[in-house]
Amino acid sequence: MLKVIGKLDPEDSSLTVDEYVPVSFRCPSVSSVPSVWWRTGNLKTSLLEIGISNSIKAIYDVTAVILPEVSIRHSSFDDLVQGSPEEISGLPLVDIADLADDDRIVYADEPHELISYFEGDSLYIWFEEITVVSKYYKTGRIAFGVNALNEICCVRADSLSSFEIDMIKPTIEN
């Protein structure tokens, strides 16, 4: 899992929803080459890629390439809302010491089953069993949920319009 070691102040970012790639987040001012691409999902019918700057260790890209079927509301959600998780403004910096290579792009695959669902105008993508989120790192319309071990366990796309939700649904529903 990606362990959070700090934060970078909020940066200009964009969240794109389209018919080909369901959700894509970019923070171009942070991107760097070489990069680490941390990938999760079952890597066949679900794939989420997270791009991490090799130099400053900030997440600058999230691409939901293939998502599993989405439900309107996940039954476990109510158990997770015990109080309000702290919301920190900024991009998470993550520990990539075991992954980074100064000379090349690195792809690190860590298979997990993805769970995705809508809650109001947000799309949640979990890549660990659904667990209580202790805090969110948020920049623009994207938030990274962090568990008690300070590991990123979910990504949340916020403030989706009804048009964006309608566009996402056919790409990920069976």
Image: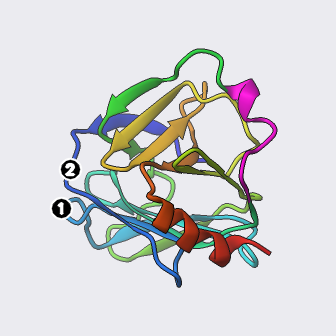
Frontmost residue, 102 versus 52: 52
Picture quadrant of residue 65: bottom right
Measured along the vertical axis of the image, is residue 162 above or below residue 57? Answer: below
Q: Which residues are magenta?
A: 71-80
Residue drawn at 30 percent across, 48 percent down: 140
Q: Is disc 1 in contact with disc 2, using a CB cutoff of under 8 Å?
A: yes
From the top left corner, tell me how far across and down residue 152 is, in percent.
55, 42
Residue drawn at 74 percent across, 67 percent down: 68
Magenta run includes residue 72? yes
Residue drawn at 47 percent across, 67 percent down: 163
Task: Give the labeled residue for mark 2.
Answer: 11
Q: In 3D space, how far apart are the residues under numbered discs 1 and 2 (Cα atoms)?
A: 7 Å
In the structure shown, which secondary structural element does the residue marked by tag 1 occupy?
Answer: loop
Amino acid at pointer 1: Ser
Task: Give the labeled residue for mark 1.
Answer: 29
Measured along the vertical axis of the image, is residue 171 above or below residue 59? Answer: below
Picture quadrant of residue 22: bottom right
From the top left corner, tell me how far across and down residue 47 is, in percent.
64, 71
Left or right of 152 on screen, residue 73: right
In the structure shown, which secondary structural element does the residue marked by tag 2 occupy?
Answer: loop
